[in-house]
Image: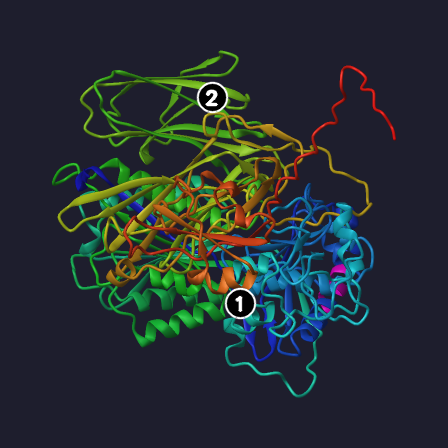
Amino acid sequence: MHLLQLCCVFTLTVFASAGPINFKGVSYSGVVVSIDGNVPSSECERIILNLEAALHNTSKALSIALNGMASFDSFTVLLPSHWPDSCLDKTGQVVVASNGETPDFRIGITHPVYGDTTWTQQSQQCGEPGDFVYISHKLLLQQRDLGRMLVKEWAKYRYGVFDEVGYAGDLVYPACYHGDLTEDAQINGCSDKPLHENGRCESGLAFNVSHTVHNEATSSLMFTTDPERITKFCDQASHDRFAPTKQNSLCNRRSVMEVIKSHKDFVDSFEPMFQFNTTPTIIYKRPMLTRYVVVIEDTKEMLVRESWSFMRLALRKWAVHDLPPNTEVGLVAINESSAIRLHALNPLQSSRARDQVASNIPYSPGDSRIPACLGCGIKLALEMLVEKNSLNGPASSVIIVIAPGTSDQSIETNQLIEQAITNDVRIATITYPQQKRARSLDWLANATGGLAYSINESNYNSETSYLSTYFKLTNVMWNILEKYYQGDSADLLIEIHRRELLDDGRSSVTGSFVLEEWLGEPASFTVFTHNTENPLIRAISLTSPSHKVYSTRSDSLLSLKLLSLLANINETGTWTYTIERFPGSPQPHYVQVMATPWSRTAPVVRARVWTSKSNNPLVIYTEVKRGDWPVQGARVEVTVTKIELNGYIYKEKFELIDSGSGDPDLMRGDGIYSRYFSPANGGPGVYTFEVTVTDNGNTAYSWQHETRHVLNTELKLDPNCCGSFMPSPTVQPLSPFQRVLPPVKVSFSSEDVSTPVTVGRVGDLKVEIIPLDLKARLSWTAPDMGGIAVARYELKYATSIGDILDNFEESFIWSHGTPFPLAPGSETSFTLNMTRNPSLLDRTLYFAIRGFKNLSDDSTFGPVSNWVRVMVPSPPPPPPPPSTYPSQPIETDWP
């Protein structure tokens, strides 16, 4: 437990979303396709023409697959910034500025594991949206019908369904399996007609599943998209509930069509009686410009010690020092009855224009404590953005609202939110300096797909705020810049090191950071200081890996509370720094190091965090990738805090894991780390989750990066990937790194705490038969019981798959020992010794397991695991005794 005055709370509310896709009637609009910057522009005309054909075919194929319930009305294609307008010459269209769209489909280069097959990154549970669909650009170099292939991936991305096919070498989702209806091996899949095994399973060789399809079959697209007659998904009638597919395991054995029809798009839908036009329109855009209107509450509630001056300085740093040139900024102040335009929406093309942004903010807030008219400010900001769009063309439009909360939402505010959505305007909110109203501003951001932050001012004494408040505020503004920047992400600096320096009696502090490969100038080493007249720092020195020492300070940013060094931070390796501080400093200092990727294709380590939409149960997700390739073996640590009413802070820590156990982590080795969180210990309230990602003491690694673009146009469509794990090609260790992500805020009610949802399924139960020892070894990953470690297990068996899954309670208990519970994510094993019950030898049995949250008899238990087949043969009969011969011949008298 820690005292409140020692902490400044800064949080972000964010959850995964499939983007602002609109479904009306039977048509989708707002679907976005982006083309990665590493796709060669020399092939742009062919790619564009073939992409248009592919999107037309996809719309038609979706309508056929869903019996006319859905098709695509429009697509937006985002072109790379370096592609010329001539790429569209054969389409007759022109490029317009992007509105800040988030891609649903990505077109990029060949993937090291998936090859050139289309694939979808899925991180969340059944029925939840995927992260994106990936299309290899090589598929678009020639004319081919990609409709069914993309419909399969769209079903994963939009409806949250999974493959109905097995994978070679995957023990959880095998290519073949033995069921309980026949002794013969079966192909793992789903179809409305029998699949032709024809000895393929017994051969042990990889095979093309499309060759197993019956010549009259029409489903399932989640099994294979070839041949052309496969146009449907499996429904309840054709679905095999017991096949060990990913769909069955993660969707509680429901068919693909059952999951699709339960999606919000089709709750009140019907199968149309006539054919709709399925030809979509295609619009081409390019990221060009971001427009911000910052709405600031101008009341006394915004003044808590130094909170107002900190806000002015943070906005000055953001406008003068951080924002890129392709940005326009306007300012609005709101009081209890009106909104005032402080600064018109103008471009930042000169230092004077940048200075004017911050200079127009009043030096102190107004005297009223009456809540400001939030709707007035949003209305004026919308008018400014809409007017600018009509005069100068579209742009990514963002309203940033800074206020100490809001009262209950009004009809007028809801109407303004609808206007914002209609005009593609996102609202980003910062509840600051404290939440002094009934509600935070989060709901405004969530309603428009924006970012929501909360920063609580923390005080040193009655007049002075801690520097941490300002440090957090500057990071919030930088995070907003990163999110809405309309350009290549490689243009922006990346934070590679941060450190808080407290007064611990030392006069000299030494630290280090690693400038990773592919990072360099522009770069900066800065120290945040509270006192600009006397920073209480005697000296700063920075030593490069080649032992070159930089010690010349610069005060050019001191007015922004920043000390910097005149150093060329461009040498890969370990840099060390020494900061000599005067003892007795009441304020901390913050060290922050930033660097820039070498190019748009530079494979640098990036991370992002999000949460599940539901907070009962709540899942924390973090993606860690080097370029586009997953980082494995990283340490992803979550620090959880909750401010208690008595002024103390509840705190705990845990690590996210990339186990692929299925609940909640879906695939091992994909670079997505996850865990459940339980508020059982801390109780109801508002929790803050801060994620720090590191190399875990030089143990993190990723796939080896190919620096040259592969010009070979041969398609790689062989891989059937990936089930419970993503295989790793050639890997390489990563140099030390640190990434601190924006904190996430989540509220839990008393009901959330008292009625937790049942989770903690073992989804990767496997078996190895040891016939010589008359044993079978079970193995699995210790489950995450909703943020709690498993306390005990219950292991049972039955003589059929249906009995062990549907009648687990009545199944036989394995009474000869129990598995030992370990921490979530731990590899666990247990040996079945059949000599303890010889009657089970030579019998085909089906085992499953489930975990319990505590040792009591009435403990909450998790779902039943996947099943495994166990058949341990009896030992062979002993050989006959050897023949014996006498040592001396025996004479026998014959009659």
Describe residue 437's horizontal placement relative to residue 162 as left or right. Answer: left
Describe residue 511's horizontal placement relative to residue 179 as left or right. Answer: left
Instruction: State whether residue 332 is above or below residue 735.
Output: below
Are there few (<14), some (14-19), or many (20+) residues within 10 Å of tag 1?
A: few
Between 669 and 788, the residue placed more toward the observer is 788
Instruction: State whether residue 800 is above or below residue 830.
Output: below
Describe residue 684's horizontal placement relative to residue 476 as left or right. Answer: left
**Residue shown at 52%/54% (left/top)?**
866
Between 541 and 106, the residue placed more toward the observer is 106
What residue would you read off at disc 1? 390
| Residue situated furthest bottom in the rendering | 273
What amino acid type should be assigned to the residue bearing mark 1?
Answer: Ser
Where does the image place residue 403, in percent across and percent down from the top left?
Answer: 28, 56
Where does the image place residue 191, in percent across and percent down from the top left?
Answer: 70, 67
Where does the image place residue 343, in percent across and percent down from the top left?
Answer: 37, 56
- Give the residues in magenta: 50-56
What amino acid type should be assigned to the residue bearing mark 2?
Answer: Ala
Mark 2 and mark 1: span between their CA atoms?
45 Å
Between 23 and 235, the residue placed more toward the observer is 235
| SS for callout 2 | loop
